[in-house]
Amino acid sequence: MHELVLRAGEALVEPVSEALMNELDALSVSVEDADVDTEAEQALFGEPGLPAPHGAWPHSTVRALFSDEARATTAAALLLAQDWATQVHVQALQVVPDADWVRLTQAQFSPVEITPTFWIVPSWHDAPASAHKMIRLDPGLAFGTGTHPTTRMCLRWIARHAGAWPRVLDYGCGSGILAIGAALHGAQDVEAVDIDAAAVEATRANAAANSVQVVAAAPEQAQGRYALVLANILAKPLTLLAPVLSAHVAAGGHLVLAGILERQVDELRAAYAAWLSLDVQDEEDGWVLMVGQAAAAS
């Protein structure tokens, strides 16, 4: 394979990338800050849930991968011939050594410790000796591989409060990792819902791979009340969903929320105050886990 390396300004990154992928047969396109490791380097992305402050870096390196040299050369010639591409410059055209990309990708993912005895383990790894419980989960299209602090905090809470919950709801299930974690820690009837059909399918596949029973479906399929409701999304949708999620919590049941930044704690408390009181029960890398308990039946 051959790699075409280009330099482009902020306004040209998007049209260059689209042309390479959609019209010039690039196998992949990646964009990097051309000023990385210099005084001009700057962060591009803001906080989760907020728009990026810029569409691209002021000076970007665009890398496009092609199956052979002829395609890479043709792509460069056609791209530079466009009137709008006068400020695009070729930095290199180089051979990319053959590699076992599957193995290289897998090497990026190692077992993740949730507690000393509870781990998330990719299918190609051996389980750690201390893993009395584990979730076998491979990175896929749906969010939730256990590497993000919000997922780890939810799973830690589940492990530390393990019990025979009669019903559990994982709202916005992604990969289904929280639903699977609950099933492994005593939950009897576990449901997982998501607006993304790919997440529903991923949850079903991951539950089967871990030999647990999880019913995965669209959100409207969630009915009634649950002893435990889990939602790892982001603060804004959690705020909007306050009436819906609170209505699903059974008397004496728990609501566990994640995807919340430290500065958003008061906003979430206010949003749920009409139904239950939320407290911060875990925090990691600027993220917090908030938990509330519904009043017991009188």
Image (tube, helix red, strand yellow):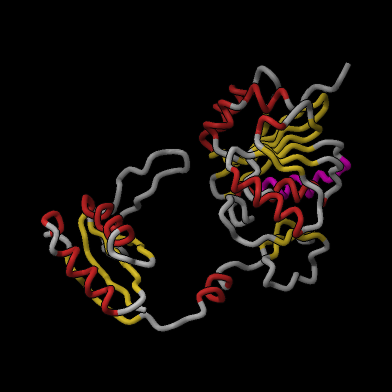
Q: Is residue 179 left or right of residue 83?
A: right
Total label count? 0
Choose between 140 and 20: the one closer to the eye.
20
Q: Position of residue 173 (x, y in %)?
A: 65, 43
Q: Position of residue 143 (x, y in %)?
A: 58, 50
Find out whether residue 54 is within the magenta segment.
Answer: no
Q: Position of residue 284 (x, y in %)?
A: 60, 49
Look at the magenta stretch and give its main secondary structure. helix
Q: Is residue 22 left or right of residue 10?
A: right
Residue visible at 21% across and 53% down in the picture:
12
Q: Quadrant of residue 231?
A: top right
Residue visible at 87% across and 36% down in the picture:
166
Picture quarter with the N terminus: bottom left
Q: Is residue 172 left or right of residue 128?
A: left
Residue visible at 83% across and 63% down in the picture:
132
Res 280 seen here: no
Q: Position of residue 287 (x, y in %)?
A: 57, 44
Q: Quadrant of residue 194?
A: top right
Find out whether residue 163 is within the magenta segment.
Answer: yes
Tell me if residue 37 comes above or below residue 246 in the rendering.
Answer: below
Highlighted magenta segment, given as a residue range: 152-164
Residue visible at 80% across and 22% down in the picture:
295
Tell me if residue 223 comes above or below residue 194 in the rendering.
Answer: above
Res 102 seen here: yes
